Amino acid sequence: MEVVRCARCGVFFTSGGYVCSKCQSKDDQELSAFKDFMEKNGSNCNTLSEVCNETGIALSNLNRFLDYEGLKSYKKLFN
Ligand SMILES: [Zn+2]
């Protein structure tokens, strides 16, 4: 089994994915908040820090979300 480190709390786990089971619901919540925000306001934001301020989602998590399938198209907005 592959051991991964949770992208949110740093704990090691083996269940697959980016975050541990304890962080999963919070991560899902933030991911959908981010998607929502980008659909409504994405074109008004030039930097990830703006998104961070508006949504309260940490920059490290925003950067991770941008690498997810389906969200990569947003990545070019922040270059
Ligand atoms: Zn975790």
Image: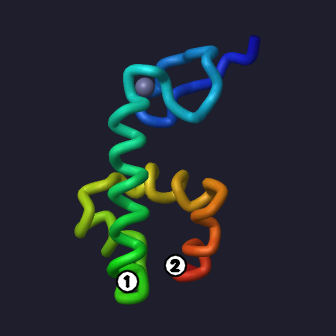
Residue type at mark 1? Cys
* Quarter of image, res 23: top left
Give the x, y percent position of residue 70.
62, 62
Q: Is mark 1 within 8 Å of ligand 1?
A: no
The picture places residue 20, in percent across and down from the top left corner, at: 48, 23
The residue at 62%/57% (across/down) is: 67
Q: Please give the residue where the numbered disc 2 appears in the rendered image.
A: 78
Q: Secondary structure at mark 2?
A: helix
Describe the element under mark 1 as helix, strand or loop.
loop
Q: Nearer the viewer, residue 38 or 4?
A: 38
Residue plotted at (50% across, 36% down): 7
Q: Nearer the viewer, residue 47 or 22?
A: 22
CA gap between label 1 and label 2 equals: 8 Å
Q: Position of residue 11 (x, y in %)?
A: 48, 19
Mark 2 neighbour class, 10 Å CA radius: few under 14, some 14 to 19, many 20 or more: few
Residue beneath disc 1: 45
When asked about the image quadrant of residue 1, the answer is top right
Q: Residue at x 41, y 75 (%)?
A: 39
Q: Amino acid at mark 2?
A: Phe
Earlier sequence position, callout 1 versus callout 2 = 1
Residue 22's disc is: none
Tell me the crowding category of disc 1: few under 14, some 14 to 19, or many 20 or more residues within 10 angstroms, Cα based: some
Residue 31 lies, with reference to residue 5, above or below; the image says below
Q: Are marks 1 and 2 in contact (CB under 8 Å)?
A: yes
